[in-house]
Amino acid sequence: MSVLDIFSPQISVVAHGLEGKVITVYGGNNLGKTKQATRMKKPLYLPFEKGLNAIAGVPFMPINSWADFKKVNKQLTKQSEKAREAYQTIIIDEVDAFAKYATRYVCNQYGVNRIKDGNDGYGLWTEYETELWEEINKLLGVGYTVVFIAHAKEDKEGKIHLKGDKRAVAPVIDNSDIVAYLHTNGVDENGDVIKSSAYLAETEHFFARSRFDYIATKIDEYTAENLEAAIVDAIKKQEEIEGIQTVTFDEQKKVYASEELDFDKIMEEIDEIGNQLVEQERVEELVDVVEQHLGKGKKVSECTKHQVDVVSIILDDLKDLL
């Protein structure tokens, strides 16, 4: 864990391979979105809609409620070291249904029929957004390749975007390294379906994107193998052109990690500094710092481990006093 010191910043690095990458694939029906996702390395499929009816042999968890997803997500994240031995690719199919499950959960949690009916008519939009963000955030950054599958829809101007509630779509897009739009190629002269193409750059007709500057903007034949090859090739080109050295995902994770907060240790340090300030007859300054962060009349001794972030800031401010 790195200590937060602006005079000793961390240097960003790029991880090779698909570990830790977030990929969103969207488009119309029967384009291979689910089939190709389940062909990626060591998949675990989380179906929020019935996408496996014609695909056999795929490990999956039955998701019939948001509570089911939260339980699975907890295992994938809390037991990530063991889970990553079994799975590399976690597939969430699909985003719009994912949002509907979360909506139902929040409504049931607060005893209302619709999100907008909660909070005395002001709505439960913040609670809903927080619920979505927290579960998505838990899953990302563990080291899985996370694949979100979504349907497509046209906006009023005819441009194609991901279908779904904006509060669910936004954190998915914002966290995605790649958003691929799939387009049909029709059938060949024998009437057999030609594999769809994937577009990785936005046009006036549809939304797509990639964080990788050197990636191909189109995959003519969309398959799991071709998608992986496009990402790996893009990272290799970045190494060659920019002269960087890529790292493993676990090495990258260490670079971006911040100092782990130990509640008990922080409380001990606050107690020590507090005693020094009392000896220096600076009790008023001590109280001012504490009340600034906790409120009038509050004491650090009343804090719980859930407030570790707050007490860490109090400790920093008390250190400044000395």
Image: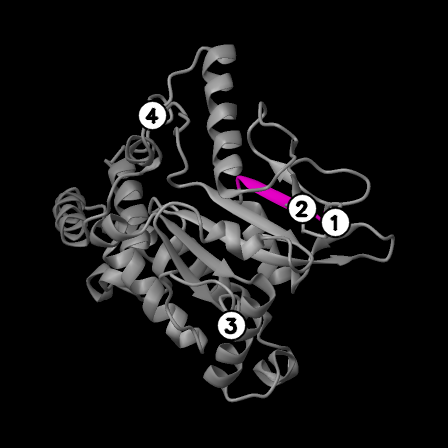
Q: Quick check: 203 left or right of 44?
A: right
Q: Which mark is residue 186?
A: 1
Q: Is residue 183 magenta?
A: yes
Local secondary structure at mark 4 = loop
The residue located at (37%, 45%) in the rendering is 41
- Give the Cα distance between marks 2 and 3: 36 Å
The disc, 1 or 4, on the residue closer to the chain's N-terminal end is: 1
Q: Which mark is residue 102?
A: 3
- Give the Cα distance between marks 3 and 4: 36 Å
How many residues crowd mark 1 within 10 Å: few (<14), some (14–19), many (20+)? few
Q: Position of residue 225 (x, y in %)?
A: 48, 38
The disc, 4 or 2, on the residue closer to the chain's N-terminal end is: 2
Q: Position of residue 243 (x, y in %)?
A: 45, 10
- Part of the protein shown in magenta: 177-184
* Residue 126 in view in this figure: no
The C terminus sits in image quarter: top left
Amino acid type, residue under disc 1 in the picture: Gly
